[in-house]
Image (cartoon, rainbow, N blue to C red):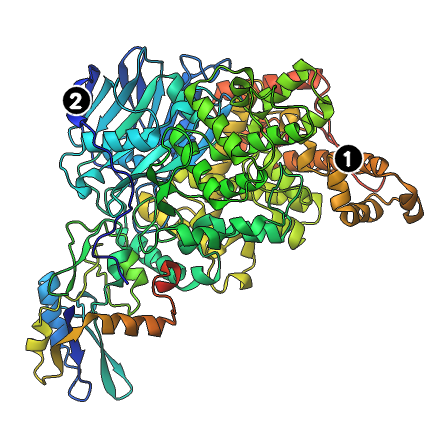
Amino acid sequence: MPIDRGYETGNTTHEWDIAKLKAAHKVLAEYKYEKKPIEKGFAGRVLYIDISKLTFKEEPVTKDMKKTFTGGRGFGLKMLWDTIKPTTRWDSEENGLVITTGPMCGTTQYPGMGKSLCLTISPSTNIICDSNVGGFFGPYLKFCGFDAVEVQGKANEDVIIVIDGENSKITIETAPMEETNSHLVNEQLTYMYADEDTEASRQLISVVSSGKAAENSYWGCLNFSFWDQRRKVARMKQAGRGGLGSVLRNKKLKAIVAKVDKVTGELNNPVDVQKIAEVGTKYHKEIRDLDRYQCNMRTVGTGHLVEIMDDYDLLPTENYRFGTFPKASRLYSPEFYKRFAKRIPDGCWHGCTMACAKTVDGFTIRTGPYKGQKVTVDGPEYETVGCCSNMSVWDPDWCLEFNFYCDTYGLDTISTGTGIAFYMEMYEYGILNKERCDGLELSFGNAEAMLELMHRMARGDDGEFVKVAGKGIRRVKDWLKQKGWGDPQLIEDCGMESKGLEYSEYVTKESLAMQGGYGLTLKGPQHDEAWLIFMDMVNNQIPTFADKAEALHYFPMWRTWFGLNGLCKLPWNDVEPANNAEQSHPERVPEHVQNYVEIQNAITGWSVDANELILQSERCYNWQRAMNVWMGRGRRKDDWIPYRSMGPVTKMEYMSRQERYDKVLLEKVNVPEDKLKCMQVEEKMKILYDFRQNEYQKLADAVYYRRGWTPNGVPTPQKLKQLGINHPEMLEMLQQKIDEDEKAGLNAWGGKYSDEESPPTTDMKYWEKW
Amino acid sequence: MKTKIIVHYPEKCTGCLACEKACSQVHFKTQNGGEESAIRIEKKGDKFEATVCNHCGLCIDMCPVQALKRTPKGTVLLNKNICIGCQACVGFCPRGVMRRASARVEPFKCIACGSCVRACPEGALELVEVELDDIEEMVYIKQGVEDPDCQGGGH
């Protein structure tokens, strides 16, 4: 039945003395700005705040800026390029934490149009990490009058930034008494800054915060709140990847608050709102009619993937050693469906009827500082469940507790889960043990030890392991090697990180294209650039290197596009039109691409087509790779991936899928059958290891070539010029780096090719002829 | 709980559209009818059919800002000052009777005011009091949903 007669979460309620908290604030700086309407999706200016110098600066958004960078993440790249140095690190004074919106952000008529793209120099990777997030802050930032904000500097004591769009005023205030952990501070600040004691008034506030564990780790996430009128809870979505929350807390920023005076469906002042409503209504109907037969996002969110991944041997279990597990059904979506609150519109921005942001309300916490309290848990999403699978934690309630504490402590569930799964594997091999783990019995499946590690991180425990564990797999690998514990090769091969960032939750051993989808990326191994496992492994649609390279060109560009505009990727292909399979490129969901073309035009007044959308991305994608190069990375060596993502690291893994791997040796490596029969497993593993490493290098060759980069992975000045980028400093820098690579003999293909094969071209400087 | 819904008697209807004009007068202060009317009369074969809201209230649970409410009398109303024009209710309405006109992006719906009933020269429309639960059940059955509490299937 409809629940229009009220809903109770059953959560523990808090009695805050908000007036007392507020009275402890000291306003350090105040800035009044002129409020202007948004025009065709753009607020027309970006904002810089320095919390060391207590200064504010506005900068207009120029035509050239829109042409080169489109908006959103593109603007963030430009702002960082203008304000940081190649030597800037995550904790440098000048490192900027950028929150961007995008011209389509804040649209209510089409699902998934309230995303923010956040950028900073990541503690994990020492290059730019971009992370996308829902919640109300992005749209509200734009409604307040800014397309993006960059925060630089560091405060001496805990401060908050309040962007008050109602009164056109920004303040930096000390905030000594508020909680740090997100589920509490978001609630406190929402009550504090809401004009009236009503749900509608609280819905006009959005808070960005992190948590205590973000202060003591590189895994800090940002939590973006969105007030849920029915649950009366400051729910939140996470900008998880790359340690953005660690940067926030390193700056002693406790929170950023945005406040608007109203929300309507036309605040973007689009050129043609009726067109957007027409396309949006068509799409809402598609979700209504088809979602239940396709992904079931409205019912269980992204968690529907757990059973599918388990079926296809792709669900990472025990640190990606296996892709399926006998106990996996305990984490299938029906288990969470039983616990989810139902019949509430669960979009993380208005109008999102895909509504994948599920919650468990009134959930009783079993450990840590909130033990015994009843809380709302946002999620779990697929990746979080995948992390529990990876840690061999097969209990949905422990999964929820892991999810809750990750969120409120400001920890990225993906990095935390993947990281701890690696530590658990090292524990199993005796490379780590109870003593080396500061007394924690970190064996696979020990949920209480896993949570205790998180509690200690949040408390700032100074145990040697606890401290290094929070810095992630890359630092732990180095630490183990420095200690002389274990076989260094085994450690390198097992730890699922690339560029210093932990992998998200898919087994890629049998999909070369997806190995590239994780490795040949800008920020590190996150599936937001490409998800090619089914195309590659299941349907065999992209058999050749050139096919895979085309996919690793098109999809990263297409998926980047969402972040330039302030959009969520999910509505693109998590429901598909009924006749999609009959289209020429069903994997691109052409009808939905056309929806986006029409809406971008209807907002901005541009007249773009589907090809132009890809070009918008290509400019920014190349710019970001170029910035990686500028910062000393962004080369072939930085696109290295661990062998665990390519094949069986251990004998047990090989034996568990012996038939499959033997078949590869027979059919792909052409090992004679009689010879194979006599081989020891170790010998087979070595041949497979060399084969798959070479396959990956050949893939990188093909992809670099397709993207117009040098054989060492550097974007060429010619490519940038083709894309209309003529910034002399950028072009000169790239030429200089290419010349350095040339001198060092690095402009060479990485794959070893047999007589029947050839690299993408024999002209190593093919781009110079463009 | 009871609510009032518009009931149409096709055998009396001549398709004069006086009801639509009266309705657009209520919602848009025009005599345009058509897309500006919450009740729509269409010719099906040699008869006329009306489509209009039955106040089942499924839209209430779709609205992210709670602009849709059921009044104590049982009528489902959209407050256009709260509405943010997202069209979720339009897209998910099982009868297609939550409507949007080109005059504004916020949708509109039947408010059971009875203007159309009063405007009909043939007495083909009537405002009838019904039991709310009967309507909802009818809608669920038509949707082929066994578990009405399943959000994914229920809409």
Q: Which residue corresponds to mark 1?
A: A689
Residue lying at 9% horizontally and 72% vertically, measured from the top left: B114
- Which element type, helix, strand or loop, lies under badge 2? helix
Viewer-proximal residue among A220 and B148 = B148
| Image position of A290 (left or right of A471) | left
Quadrant where the image shows the C terminus of chain A: top right
Q: Which residue occupies 67% across, 19% down?
A: A741
Residue hosting label 2: A20
Residue at 47% over, 52% down: A335
Q: Indicate the position of residue A511 as horizontal and vertical percent values.
A: 67, 44
Q: Secondary structure at mark 1?
A: helix
Q: What is the CA distance from the residue labelled 1 to the residue labelled 2?
A: 63 Å
Asked if residue A282 lies left or right of residue A664, the reply is: left
The residue nearer to you, when weighing A41 against A194, is A194
**Is A462 on the left-hand or right-hand side of B147?**
right
Amino acid beneath label 2: Lys
**Mark 1 or mark 2, whichever is nearer to me:** 2
On the question of residue A43 being in view, the answer is: no
Q: Are marks 1 and 2 on the same chain?
A: yes
Identify whether A357 is placed above or below A84: below
User: B40 or A600: which is nearer to us?
Assistant: B40
Chain label for disc 2: A
Label 2 Cα crowd, 10 Å radius (few <14 / some 14-19 / many 20+): few
Image quadrant where one finds the N terminus of chain A:
bottom left
At label 1, the amino acid type is Tyr
